Image (cartoon, helix red, strand yellow):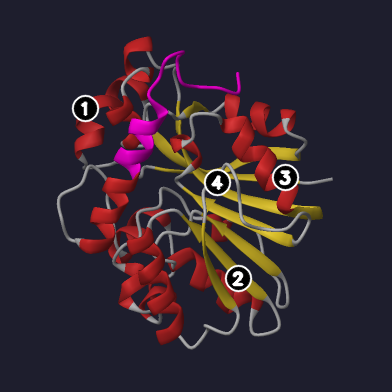
């Protein structure tokens, strides 16, 4: 159940494709992609508050490519430590930083240098550099201490992991007891065919690695989380090339998902 890619799957090629895709998003946010981007999409499709987004630097909002809205899952309190797991250009991270305030800490981890550079620039422009910390890393091996984080937010990246169990166990490791996971990710309503699972390009498109909605809480629960539940659905691929290619068969959508570390 934990490993979603077939035996012999080229995970190295997948990582290269993911890096190339999001490097290009960072450099060409208005380019042609299979997924939506930007603040109008975030507000119109995912129910973000446009006034909040307009108050953030464009470096972060123009490159936003999430699939759900983790900030609608639960509250983030002043003074807490938040980790944005694969933070991209930092839109969700800066929203979280505003909630924790100067007495808290907002950590962003991402493997893509161009995205990290945008996040650093955005945090500086927003006047939050002193409590926003951008780190290089991958979700299978987070550069974060054990039990040091109150809330992990994640938006549209767990589907990219060949081994979901490793990713959930890493999130579990860094959360303090009682810590919360606010996860946005892609799910499918029917199991994918083997030929789709074997296609690294479809994985990089956030589709071939997606779990079914039933599997998401099962895997999180197997990794030690409790109170695992989907809280909201989003039609994040509507009017995209991804919708045309696959969602009629699979009903691909974004979900908000909550889980807690006991």
Please give left or right for residue 103 compared with residue 3 in the image: right
Cα distance in 3D space between marks 1 and 3: 35 Å
Classify mark 1: helix, strand or loop.
helix
Residue depicted at x 38% and y 55%:
112
Q: Nearer the viewer, mark 4 or mark 1?
A: 4
The reply to whether the C-beta atoms of the residues labelled 4 and 1 are less than 8 Å apart is no
| Numbered mark located on residue 172 in the image | 3
Residue 14 vertical placement versus 152 (above, below) = above
Q: Earlier in the sequence, mark 3 or mark 4?
A: 4
Q: Earlier in the sequence, mark 4 or mark 1?
A: 4
Cα distance in 3D space between marks 4 and 1: 28 Å
Q: Residues within 10 Å of mark 2 (few under 14, many from 20)?
A: many
The reply to whether the C-beta atoms of the residues labelled 3 and 4 are less than 8 Å apart is no
Residue depicted at x 27% and y 47%:
20
Q: Decide whether residue 17 is among the magenta residues.
A: yes
| Numbered mark located on residue 106 in the image | 2
Q: Residues within 10 Å of mark 4 (few under 14, many from 20)?
A: many
| Numbered mark located on residue 245 in the image | 1
Where's the N terminus, which quadrant? top right
- Please state the total of marks drawn on the protein image: 4
| Numbered mark located on residue 139 in the image | 4
Q: Decide whether residue 248 is among the magenta residues.
A: no
Classify mark 4: helix, strand or loop.
loop
Residue range in magenta is 1-18
């Amino acid at each position: 159940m934990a490993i979603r890619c077939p035996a012999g799957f080229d995970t190295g090629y997948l990582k290269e494709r993911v890096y190339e895709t999001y490097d290009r998003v960072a450099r060409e946010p208005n380019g042609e992609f299979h997924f939506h981007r930007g603040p109008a999409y975030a507000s119109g499709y995912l129910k973000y508050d446009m006034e909040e987004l307009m108050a953030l630097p464009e470096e972060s909002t123009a490159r936003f490519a999430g699939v759900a809205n983790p900030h609608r899952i639960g509250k983030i309190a002043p003074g807490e430590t938040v980790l944005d797991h694969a933070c991209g250009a930092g839109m969700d991270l800066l929203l979280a930083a505003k909630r924790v305030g100067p007495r808290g800490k907002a950590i962003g981890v991402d493997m893509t240098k161009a995205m990290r550079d945008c996040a650093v620039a955005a945090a500086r422009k927003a006047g939050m550099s002193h409590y926003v910390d951008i780190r290089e890393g991958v979700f299978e091996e987070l550069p974060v201490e054990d039990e040091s984080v109150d809330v992990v937010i994640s938006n549209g990246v767990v589907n990219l992991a060949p081994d979901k169990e490793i990713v959930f166990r890493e999130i579990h490791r860094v959360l303090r007891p009682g810590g919360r996971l606010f996860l946005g990710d892609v799910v499918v309503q029917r199991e994918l065919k083997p030929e789709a699972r074997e296609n690294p390009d479809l994985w990089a498109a956030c589709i071939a690695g997606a779990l079914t909605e039933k599997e998401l809480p099962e895997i999180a629960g197997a990794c030690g989380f409790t109170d695992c539940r989907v809280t909201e659905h989003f039609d994040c691929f509507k009017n995209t090339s991804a919708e045309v290619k696959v969602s009629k068969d699979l009903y691909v959508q974004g979900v908000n998902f909550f889980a807690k570390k006991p």
